[in-house]
Amino acid sequence: MAIGYTEPQAGTDLAALRTRAVREGDHYVISGQKVFTSLAHLADYVFLAVRTGDPATHPRHKGISTASR
């Protein structure tokens, strides 16, 4: 397992993350970029911090979820 939290523009400030998860039918489409994910190439799963709320209507610290693959 690896954890994908760090982003180029946000570092480890999760409230500033830009990776989005948008619901399409019964699944989510995730778009964005993560960096410094140690051992991701060996992991069976990567847990991502993603923004599911609309940043225009949610405070920075709300609308953040985790997703895994």
Image: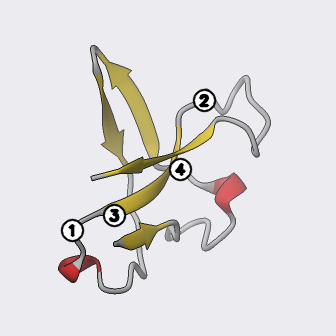
User: Where's residue 55, x and y in %?
Assistant: 66, 33
Mark 4 vs 1: CB contact within 8 A:
no
| Circle 4: residue type | Arg
Q: Residue at left 40%, top 28%?
A: 22
| Circle 1: residue type | Asp
Residue 11 appears left or right of 44: right
Mark 3 vs 1: CB contact within 8 A:
no
* Distance (Cα) linking label 3 and label 4: 17 Å
First in sequence: mark 3 vs mark 4: 4
First in sequence: mark 2 vs mark 1: 1
Task: Determine which residue is flagged by label 2.
Answer: 53
Mark 2 vs 1: CB contact within 8 A:
no
First in sequence: mark 4 vs mark 2: 4
Residue 29 appears left or right of 47: left
Task: Determine which residue is flagged by label 3.
Answer: 46
Q: Which mark is residue 18?
A: 4
* Distance (Cα) linking label 2 and label 1: 27 Å
Whether residue 39 is situated above or below residue 29 in the rendered picture: below
Q: Tell us which disc is closer to us: 3 or 4.
A: 3
Task: Determine which residue is flagged by label 1.
Answer: 44
Q: Residue at left 44%, top 57%?
A: 48
